[in-house]
Image: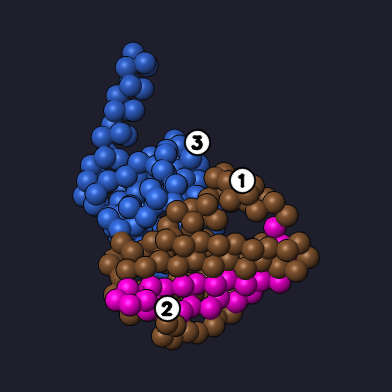
Chain colours: A brown, B blue
Amino acid sequence: MLIETGETMPLRNSDDVVRVRQAVRARAIAAGFSLVDQTKIVTAASEVGRNTVDYGGGGTLRIELLRDGRRTGVRLTFTDQGPGIADIAKAMTDGYTTGGGLGLGLSGAKRLSNEFAITSTPGIGTVVTLARWK
Amino acid sequence: MSEIPILKIGDCLLVSIQVDMHDRLAMALQDDLTQRIVADRARGVMIDISALEIVDSFIGRMLNNIAAMSRVLDAVTVVVGMRPAVAITLVELGLALTGVRTALNVDKGLAMIRSIIDSSENADAHRDR
């Protein structure tokens, strides 16, 4: 698998989440995604990006355009140095939230992705990686 | 005040969301609309989301909240113009938007609001007799 291009963006506030949505859309178009696939990965980016800002205390997003033979894809890596998630299984449950949201962020983003991984260490931070292929 | 204009047409309020909304803007719109329903004695609220390229759980929650608050204030909310790709993504995300009435476009949305208001007024008149 080849990483064709990549860029890293800051995620500090809700304006950055809007910028992230636009940047992910541009990469998804570059990867040749259909409109529905673009919409899915942009929505997933919005959900996880908001978590990075609201729960992770801000962080970064790395966007990569992938090529694997004839397949193209987009991979997103969200990194924060926040408090971390003590119980990932619980955090991935529909409807579970420690904030005021609907608790659909992580579980919904996973459903919208082809690949999804989350690692978190309390006190160190959280890394969420998701990818969608054309 | 949010940056999203709220237009008054008869006893209805019309909002057309034309910008990529950040979370604070969504919250501001929710507050403004609730105030305006009372100030303008509105019976219907129509929210046009045809320009929205995504509806995530935050915006979905805002739409749910507006619908619930307007119901408490005796007004009907109809969301119109959702893009097909947005609808497909919303369902997969797990957001059913239960409690939010939807219509395909502004024309159908206005007709829906009209018929709901008229039927509730007929029911009131019937009770008063």
Which circle, 3 or 2, is nearer the viewer?
A: 2
Instruction: Tell me if residue A103 comes above or below residue A2 in the rendering.
Output: above
Q: Is residue B47 magenta?
A: no
Residue type at the position of mark 2: Met
In the image, what residue occupies the spot 42% across and 82% down?
A2
* Residue A13 vs residue B95, the one in the foreground: B95
Residue at the extreme right of the image, as rendered: A123
* Residue A69 vs residue B100, the one in the foreground: A69
Write down the residue under mark 3: B72
Write down the residue under mark 1: A96
Badge 2: residue crowd in 10 Å (few <14, some 14–19, many ≥20): few
Residue A78 lies in quadrant: bottom right
Q: Is residue A75 magenta?
A: yes
- Residue B67 locus on image (x, y percent): 44, 43
Q: Magenta residues, as a range?
A: A57-85
Residue A129 lies in quadrant: bottom right
